[in-house]
Image (cartoon, rainbow, N blue to C red):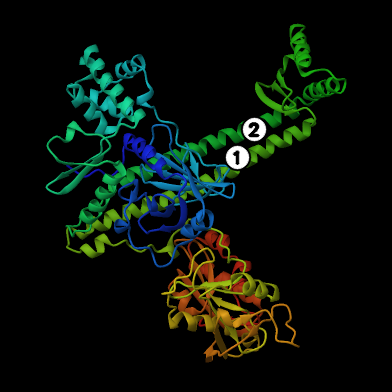
Amino acid sequence: MDPKRELTSVDLAALERELTTYEGARVEKVYLYDDGLVRFKMREYDLGRIELLVDTGEFKHVRVATPERVPQAPERPPNFAMMLRNRLEGAHLESVEQFEFDRILSLEFKRSGESTTIVAELFGDGNLAVLDNVGEVVDCLSTVRLKSRTVVPGSPYEYPEARFNPLAVDKERFKARIDDSDTDLVRTLATRLNFGGIWAEELCTRAGVEKVIDIEEVTDEMVDAVYNEVETLREQVAAGDFDPRLYTDDGRPIDVTPLPMQEHADLDEEHFDQFTEALDIYATNLDSDDDEPSAPQRPDFEAEIEKKQRIIDQQQGAISNFDEQSEAEREKAESLYANYDLVDDILRTVRTARNEGTPWEEIQERFEQGKEQGIEAAQAVEGVDGSEGTVTVTVDDKAATLFVEDGVEKNADRLYQEAKRIQEKKAGAQAAIENTREELAEIKARRDEWEADDGEDDSQEDTEQRDIDWLSRSSVPVRQSDNWYDRFRWFHTSDGFLVIGGRNADQNEEIVKKYLDRGDLFFHAQAHGGPVTVLKATDPSESYDEELTIPDSSKEEAAQFAVSYSSVWKDAKFSGDAYMVDHTQVSKTPESGEFLEKGGFAIRGDRTYFRDVPVGVAVGVTCEPETRVVGGPPEAIADQAESVIEVEPGKYAQNDIAKRVYREFRSRFADESFVRKIASPDLIQKFLPPGQSSMKGVE
């Protein structure tokens, strides 16, 4: 028997009840791990430290873990984790709710009156969406673009269509669903009644009914027996009457359930007071079991291919609908112009009546009377809506709702604009389908490579993820997020530390006053006219760790950054000096009798100097985990970007060299539209030093 990899809807019902115990807990930190695990470190006055884990990876689940079972925190948080920290640190867990009878759990947090909802989708590929207080997606681990629903940043979150809830059905509807089936009993319970395979088998076993009996042979007595077990399950869930079990086979974890399972009578079992406690042990042992070396298994390429093809079919269906919807709106607009006088007469009639104080109900009655008299304009009116100030007309068999205060032209233009908006949605769907086709082609290529190996023992190559050749891909998916430091000069060092620099005196002032924190290091070129440069030890939302050590390599890169974006570059020099001080040595308060200009600062105490630092700037394009332009010291950028171009003091003005770099990137990527979207000359120019430059090794 294979171990359970996904929670059931009954499991989620138990979790919803147990997790309400932690409502009121305060979020201290949020972490994101590479395998889709999100960790919420929280604290509650009576309960103390709480580690809430939401896992959308291999074993999709939510649990409260004991500290010793919490994975070690990642060294540097990715952007998604930083976004969560900015929104949630200091927030309190307000509520926990299961969506319908589905494997979706919503966690609502509140801070200063603002709410953030985390929606964990614990089915299929798994996903986690972050919603603002109006239900709009702030960000998500995976974007979803299907005919049935969309989950993308900037759009309202769309839940999947509500699944049938078998715990809310009466006996008549229960029996009707069984009678409408054309398969056996256990499959009917699993699919048509939405119990899933595990509970479908369990209900049959509890009721003493054969699982694979054909529906046509199921008697009323059998239906009654199964329904009685469903009622018992419903009462236990409603009352929170759980009795959790952890099931193992020779010490190997097989299942964890909130209720005892007769289906597991031949397995070893352990009783727990809390389902989440049993779940914590199960998940930990399951992970450790997975870590044991084993022979590489052939990936299920066919299932992946089928899934991608299904997505493509759904996307194509959406495109077809967009065409129909757009054409329908366009035809409505054209029919308004084709019947201009008639429509204008209707709108003027309603406006005149309203100006005379006629109630909307009476206007509707007059149109009804006009229909009986055979008046053409009245016969075209389907109804009026006083709350919206609209009238719905049908001309040339096409119904259109018009705003009374607008003329025919303005109403027609609105319909044309709606048709255009739908066509733009079609363009987005077409881009999504191209991305899916690319992914499908990659899966097929990996399948062909696997089969071409003909069983060769190369487990390392088979198990490691193959690098994607982004430069040759015909379509590169765009994924970006906004960062607080984007408006400054910035880069991440080879060791993952953030370095920021001012673009002007105002930003220099802001960085020193607002962003120079405990543990940070301050850099500046000896030459006049350079940016304030700060090597951040922690993010502004993080607390400083006394044991944190910043490597020398990061300090050297920060010094090179300070020199390269100073007047040293503008003067066409190839090296310069810089100094470094601790954050405590920087002050905006001048000595007595001195004056500090905007952007100026006072340095007190000893300085650490970096002599003859070579200038050096590279501009790169990253493709994962985000698509964007990056720039900074070549050593730092080289490992972060898919393609890198170095620049040096030269002969082209800043805007001219930006265009040259842009054209070079376009020549390197097969998907030129991708370069246009994320690496335009304007975006590239933001990472170039002041003064003139040339491309190193290209010109």
Q: Amino acid at mark 1?
A: Ile
Tell me where residue 123 appears, x and y as whole percent.
Answer: 36, 41
Q: Amino acid at mark 2?
A: Glu
Q: Quadrant of residue 654?
A: bottom right
Residue 374 placement, left or right of 281: right
Given residues 62 and 2, the one toward you in this image is 62
Residue at left 58%, top 33%? 325
Q: CA distance from mark 1 to mark 2?
A: 9 Å
Name the residue carrying label 2.
329
Tell me where residue 25 appears, x and y as whole percent.
Answer: 45, 49
Label tally: 2
Residue at left 64%, top 41%? 420
Tag 1–tag 2 contact (CB < 8 Å): yes
Kindly tell me whether residue 619 is visible in this rendering.
no
Residue 118 placement, left or right of 72: right
Name the residue carrying label 1.
422
Quarter of the image that includes the C terminus: bottom right
Given residues 611 and 314, the one toward you in this image is 611
Q: Residues within 10 Å of mark 1 (few under 14, many from 20)?
A: many
Given residues 428 and 472, the one toward you in this image is 428
Q: Is 54 above or below relative to 583?
A: above
Tell me where residue 245 appears, x and y as whole percent.
Answer: 22, 39
Tell me where residue 194 appears, x and y as whole percent.
Answer: 33, 29
